[in-house]
Amino acid sequence: MTETLYTQLIGLCTGTLLLTSALMVWRHSLLASIRLLSAQGVALAALVAVIGAQEGEAELLLVSLLILATKGIGLPWVLAHQSKATIRTIEESPRLNPTAALLAVTLLTILSYVVVSQLIGLGTSVGSHAAPIGLAMILTGFLLLITRRRARSQLIGFLLLDNGIATVAFLTSGGVPLLLEFGVSLDVLLVVLILHVFAGRMRNKFGGTDVDQLRELHD
């Protein structure tokens, strides 16, 4: 793979990661957010595959397949595991309107570039130049956790945060061993399954998982 093609593919993958993060904040539909999360998982798997192909490491190619199976297919399937007719009706009512949310994502992205360039420097490699996008995904994940009211929407923010951490790891250090990634993926899948079941029981018992309404029940 030529250096020019490698740079273009890294830019395409990281651009897709950042775009899907911004769209998750903008869209209020739970089904749309789950589809964007799936697309982000595919983009992350493609990013790892590109790095693996450039460095000639077969282990990274296997890690990319694992990421595709878990983050691109498995986790979104778990989140969408109910009738489409039901999930299409679920609309989030975030604490920020779409314009303010997109402005916040823009500011967080700029902040990420400033922080990374001041603390560790952007360096000369393609990966280090793209690393601020991973930090921007982490901050955007925190933004989703803070501004969303429903438990499942906050779970999507948690998974976006996890994707951001993985993006920084792969761009700055060339990735993690296959067994470590396998263990982390299983942990994340287990957490999502537990929270998904817990949110389902809360919805059946209280008729919803809106955090503000549940707080009123507590009061």
Image (spheres, helix red, strand yellow):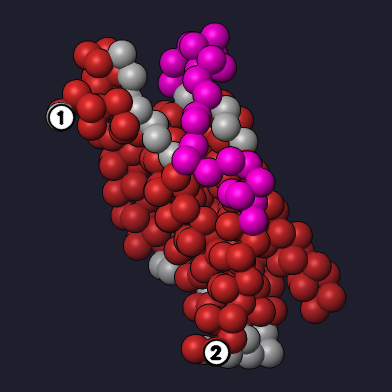
**Residue 28 seen by the camera:** yes
Mark toward the start of the polypeptide (1 vs 2): 2
Question: Could you tell me which residue is drawn at 22 percent across and 14 percent down?
Answer: 205
Give the x, y percent position of residue 88. Answer: 56, 17
Can you identify the residue that label 1 sits on? 219
**Residue drawn at the location 71% of the way across and 59% of the way down:** 15
**Is residue 68 magenta-colored?**
no
Name the residue type under label 1.
Asp
Camera sees residue 49: no
As drawn, 58 above or below 72: below
In three-dimensional space, the C-alpha distance between marks 1 and 2, rounded to whole angstroms, equals 45 Å
Q: Are marks 1 and 2 in contact (CB under 8 Å)?
A: no
Report which residue position mark 2 lands on: 118
Provide the residue span drawn in magenta.
Answer: 81-103
Residue 88 magenta: yes
Which is closer to the viewer, label 1 or label 2? 1
Nearest the eye: 214 or 13: 214
In which quadrant will I find the C terminus? Answer: top left
* Coordinates of residue 43 in the picture (x, y in percent): 64, 51
The amino acid beneath tag 2 is: Gln
